[in-house]
Image (tube, rainbow, N blue to C red):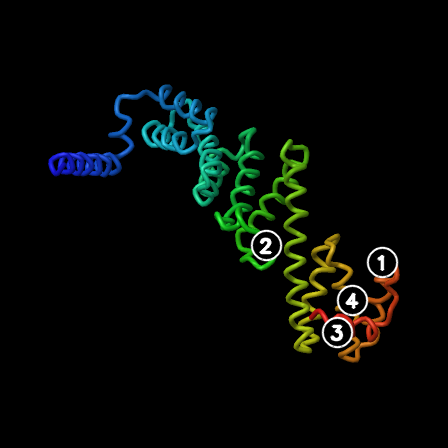
Amino acid sequence: MKKLAYFVSLFLIVLVINGCSSAHKSLEEQYKGQSADDLYTQGEVSLNKKHYKDAVQYFEALQTIYPFGQHAEQTQLDLVYAYYKSDDQISAVAAADRFIRLYPRSEHVDYAIYLRGLANFNQKRGILQNLFYTDLSQRDFGTMKQAFGDFKLLLERFPNSSYAPDAKQRMIYLRNIFAKHELDVAKFYMRRKSYVAANNRASYIVQHLQGAPETKEALQIIAAANEALGLTKPAEDAKRVLALNYSQASLSASTMHKPWYKFW
């Protein structure tokens, strides 16, 4: 038994050493002797089989060993997709940027912009995000704003793109998340009677995030905050907009903001 255990241990050590050795090999060494066509074909086969990490390896090797070959443009684009599907969103964004910079007149630029938007959209979601409900309005908005910008750029430059409808829906989704965040902050300021700050955050929703479900409550906060500040005209203006756009919304700001504090 001791001899068996010894040989098993020795075998495992050899495997680890060989694994470490291959991991440190350059792409040129790992794929030495393979042609551009071979690497491209293997990458495409891996994509079709949904073996995305394998596809990344082949496309990275092709890009490194044959950077100016006939498959260069398609390789760059496929690499963006392979990174995205293997959940390496940072690399996907970088690869998309590179494609857009190298091939600005490509017929696939709209797709590259769309993929960059998806990669930014999915950054920082993580395994906990996928397993448990998380209030996205409480997240850092850095990459989400970048995603919004990507989708906006796609709609502006390629309004007839086949990816435009999905991009538009994602923009609406992001807009609503931004609006919920602004509303939460406005409520925070109202609880602390910081009426100027509350009014500013609620006004941002009305002015820049039009159509969000939070617009009604944002107008209510604007009315209540301005009334608390003694600013009658802005308060009345907000109430008029409420009355015009929402049923049973013509209540005075003073009667409206009493029940709000039960929730704030």
Write down the residue under mark 1.
246
Q: Which mark is residue 225?
A: 3
3D distance between C-alphas at marks 3 and 2? 26 Å
Local crowd size for mark 4, using a 10 Å CA cut-off: few (<14), some (14–19), many (≥20): many
Local crowd size for mark 1, using a 10 Å CA cut-off: few (<14), some (14–19), many (≥20): few
Q: Which mark is residue 220?
A: 4
Does 225 sit left or right of 15 as displayed?
right
Residue lying at 29% horizontally and 26% vertically, measured from the top left? 31
State the quadrant of the C terminus.
bottom right
Percent across and percent down for residue 172 are 68, 47
User: Which marked residue is nearer to the observer: mark 3 or mark 2?
Assistant: 2
Percent across and percent down for residue 223 are 79, 70
Task: Compare marks 1 and 2 and give the one earlier in the sequence.
Answer: 2
User: Which marked residue is nearer to the observer: mark 2 or mark 4?
Assistant: 2
Write down the residue under mark 2.
136
| Amino acid bearing label 3 | Ala
3D distance between C-alphas at marks 2 and 4? 24 Å
Residue lying at 67% horizontally and 53% vertically, measured from the top left? 176
Closer to us: 151 or 23: 23
